[in-house]
């Protein structure tokens, strides 16, 4: 079989670089509406860390839910909804991180105060002995 039976113009066959057989094309329109804007962050890694660490009052889990919603909306191309979910995920993560730092610091501070108080002469008490619980409660009544 030769090219004459296919009636290509100027012996142009598929998979060749013959430009004479191509028609001049029209204009192409490309939608660049979000070209200058950076897509919103989804804070997924931060949400996972907050969810797996302390997760006080499920704040980290709520951040994880909104992070996944933000990623889904970004994938669908709805940048306005993705930005809203991203903002909610960010604030839940800020709250969760604050609690994740505050609770261990409070526990550490209470332990230091307890050790300092028990080391002083006023702080000695026999918790398991007679009137131990009452003397323990006097620590907090001052």
Image (cartoon, grey):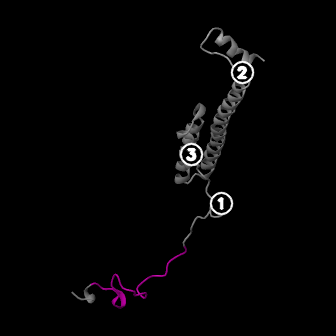
Q: Where the N terminus falls, by quadrant?
A: bottom left
SS under mark 3: helix
**Residue 6 in the image: above or below residue 33:** below
Q: Do the residues labelled 2 and 3 touch (CB within 8 Å)?
A: no
Q: Residue at x 52, y 52 (%)?
A: 76
Residues at marks 3 and 1, CA–CA distance in whole angstroms: 19 Å
- Camera-nearest residue between 93 and 28: 93
Q: Which residue is drawn at 56% across and 69% down?
A: 29
| Residue under pointer 3 | 67
Dividing the picture into quarters, in which one does residue 116 lie? top right
Q: Does the magenta stretch include residue 96?
A: no
**Residue 133 in the image: above or below residue 46:** above
Q: Nearer the viewer, mark 2 or mark 3?
A: 2
Earlier in the chain: of badge 3 and badge 1, it is 1
**Residue 18 in the image: above or below residue 34:** below
Q: Which of the numbered marks, if any, corresponds to residue 37?
A: 1
SS under mark 1: loop
Residues at marks 2 and 3, CA–CA distance in whole angstroms: 49 Å
Residues at marks 1 and 2, CA–CA distance in whole angstroms: 62 Å
- How many callouts does the rendering have? 3
The segment highlighted magenta reads 6-27
Q: Do the residues labelled 3 and 1 touch (CB within 8 Å)?
A: no
Q: Which of the numbered marks, if any, corresponds to residue 123?
A: 2
Label 1 crowd (10 A; few <14 / some 14-19 / many >=20): few
> What residue occupies the far front of the structure in this picture?
121
Q: Which percent across, then down, holds residue 84?
A: 64, 45
Dividing the picture into quarters, in which one does residue 110 lie? top right
């Amino acid at each position: 079989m030769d090219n004459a039976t296919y009636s290509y113009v100027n012996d142009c066959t598929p998979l060749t670089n013959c430009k004479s057989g191509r028609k001049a094309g029209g204009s192409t329109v490309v939608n660049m509406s979000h070209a200058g804007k950076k897509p919103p962050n989804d804070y997924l890694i931060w949400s996972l860390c907050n969810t797996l660490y302390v997760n006080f009052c499920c704040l980290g889990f709520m951040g994880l839910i909104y992070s996944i919603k933000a990623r889904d909306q970004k994938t669908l191309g709805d940048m306005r909804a993705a930005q809203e979910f991203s903002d909610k995920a960010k604030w839940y993560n800020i709250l969760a991180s604050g609690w994740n730092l505050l609770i261990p610091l409070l526990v550490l501070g209470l332990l230091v105060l307890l050790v300092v108080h028990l080391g002083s002469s006023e702080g000695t008490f026999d918790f398991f002995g007679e009137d131990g619980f009452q003397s323990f409660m006097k620590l907090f009544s001052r």
